[in-house]
Amino acid sequence: MIQVEICVGSSCYIKGSEEIIRLFRETLDKEGLTDEVDLIGCLCLGACNRNGVNLRVDGEIVTGITPENFREFFRTHIVEKLR
């Protein structure tokens, strides 16, 4: 099981955390991985930047997630970790 915390603090919310959550739910469902990933909302991770949403994957902070780079992030940080 992988734990993914998605920042929903004000800065990440403005930068699209709702969209990233939607993409996560859709992709997990499509890939049949809903039982393999624990998706949690959290407040500020202390890594704010100008681009994208910040996440924590099994304790590792990943910054700058956008709808444009979500698929690559999902492949490298979720699918590859589950293999």
Image: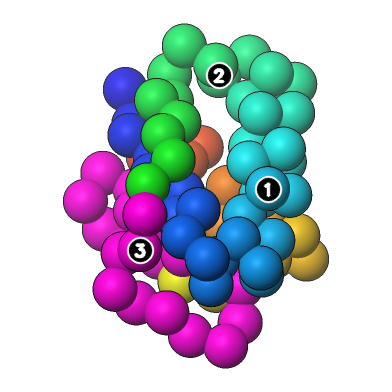
Report which residue position mark 2 lands on.
Answer: 33
- Residue 49 at x, y percent in the picture: 48, 85
Q: Alpha-carbon neighbours of circle 1 within 10 Å: few (<14), some, or many (≥20)? A: some
> Tag 1 or tag 2, which sits nearer the N-term?
1
Identify the image quadrant of the C terminus.
Answer: top left
Q: Compared to 18, does 10 lie above or below?
A: below
The residue lying at 46 percent from left, 49 percent from top is: 6
Q: Amino acid at mark 1?
A: Glu
Of all residues shown, which one is farthest toward the bottom?
A: 50
- Local packing at callout 3 (Cα closer than 10 Å; few below 14, some 14-19, many 20+) is some
Q: Name the element at disc 3.
A: loop
Residues shaded magenta: 43-62
User: Marks 1 and 2: in contact by CB < 8 Å?
Assistant: no
Which type of secondary structure does the marked residue at label 2 adopt?
loop
* Residue 51 counted in the magenta span: yes
Residue 44, label in figure: 3
* Colour mapping: rainbow
Q: Earlier in the sequence, mark 3 or mark 2?
A: 2
Cα–Cα gap, marks 3 and 2: 26 Å
Question: In this orientation, does residue 72 appear?
Answer: no
The answer to whether 4 appears left or right of 24 in the picture is: left
Q: Position of residue 7 (x, y in %)?
A: 45, 55
Q: Which residue is mark 1?
A: 18
Badge 2 density bin: few <14, some 14–19, many ≥20, Cα 10 Å: some
